[in-house]
Image (tube, rainbow, N blue to C red):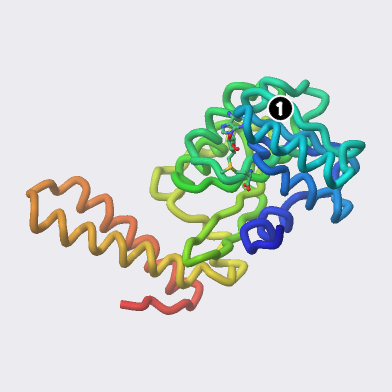
Amino acid sequence: MNSERMEGILSLIPKSDIIIDVGTDHAYIPEAIIKRNICKKVIGTEINHQPYLKAKDYIESKSLDDFIEIRKGDGLNIVQSDEINVVVIAGMGGLLINRIINENISKISKGDTLILQPMNAVDKTRKFLIENKFEILDEVLCKEDYHYYTVIKAEFKDKKNTSKNNLDYITNEMLFKKKDKYIEEFTNKIINKNQIIIENIKKNSTSKNKINELENINKKLKELLKKYEFEVYN
Ligand SMILES: C[S@@+](CC[C@H](N)C(=O)[O-])C[C@H]1O[C@@H](n2cnc3c(N)ncnc32)[C@H](O)[C@@H]1O
């Protein structure tokens, strides 16, 4: 399956002897990992019975069952600590991703890598990673059908990070620094969306807290755009 989102995910996966793909669904991610020689063995986990059967059938139909094993169960509950080296969790909500990692965080060792593609609440996933001794090594934005997707690569360092405030998780300065292809349009889209919400709150209520929060976010995003010489659209 060729898609920009998939390419973004694959671009951040390091070579490894074994890779876990949590929530594998159709098993397209394990298939692409094997076909690109990123690793020799992938374990795909799937909680729901129908996608589990679909993934197994698909892997057999492509004669990939020597390289890809599909297991049924919740997240990382069904893998052993020594099978964890690189874990991909893509296409799920950020809070669900956090829950899946947190439930089995004791199985994750120093140097293990996570490749995460949250569909929403990306700030919550960044916060979770920083608060749980991971370092965010890289991020990439992808765009498909007018939707933007963030992919995060993080390594477990087992070392406490300096604390940040919530504003620091809204975006990642790294994306500006490395001149990510979509960071300018994506950031301007967020600023515009926040501005619309601010106008609506002003019309319909007197609540100042949410307005302040969104104004602070927009201020920070505009500062980053300017710092890295991107355009602020309005
Ligand atoms: C939208 S699909 C994403 C498929 C694929 N990872 C991708 O990015 O293209 C999400 C899949 O995760 C599965 N899933 C949700 N929660 C899960 C969990 N706790 N453990 C394993 N699989 C889960 C769902 O059944 C579904 O098949």
Question: Which part of the image, by quadrant, shows the N terminus?
Answer: bottom right
Q: Is residue 216 left or right of residue 206?
A: right
Q: Nearer the viewer, residue 66 or 15?
A: 66
Residue at the spot 23% in from the left edge and 63% down from the top edge: 196
* Location of residue 133 by image quarter: top right
Q: Amino acid at mark 1?
A: Ile
Q: Is residue 197 shown above or below 162?
A: below
Q: Quadrant of ligand 1?
A: top right
Residue at the spot 64% in from the left edge and 24% down from the top edge: 105
Q: Is residue 218 shown above or below 83?
A: below
Residue at the spot 51% in from the left edge and 67% down from the top edge: 183
Q: Is residue 84 left or right of residue 165?
A: right
Residue at the spot 23% in from the left edge and 57% down from the top edge: 197
Q: Is residue 110 shown above or below 89?
A: above
The residue that disc 1 covers is: 108
> Residue 191's spot in the image, x, y percent?
34, 64
* Location of residue 102 by image quarter: top right
State the SS at label 1: loop
Q: Is residue 101 shown above or below 224?
A: above
> Residue 43's spot in the image, x, y percent?
78, 34
Q: Nearer the viewer, residue 20 or 86?
A: 20
> Residue 146's spot in the image, x, y percent?
47, 67
> Residue 179's spot in the image, x, y percent?
59, 71
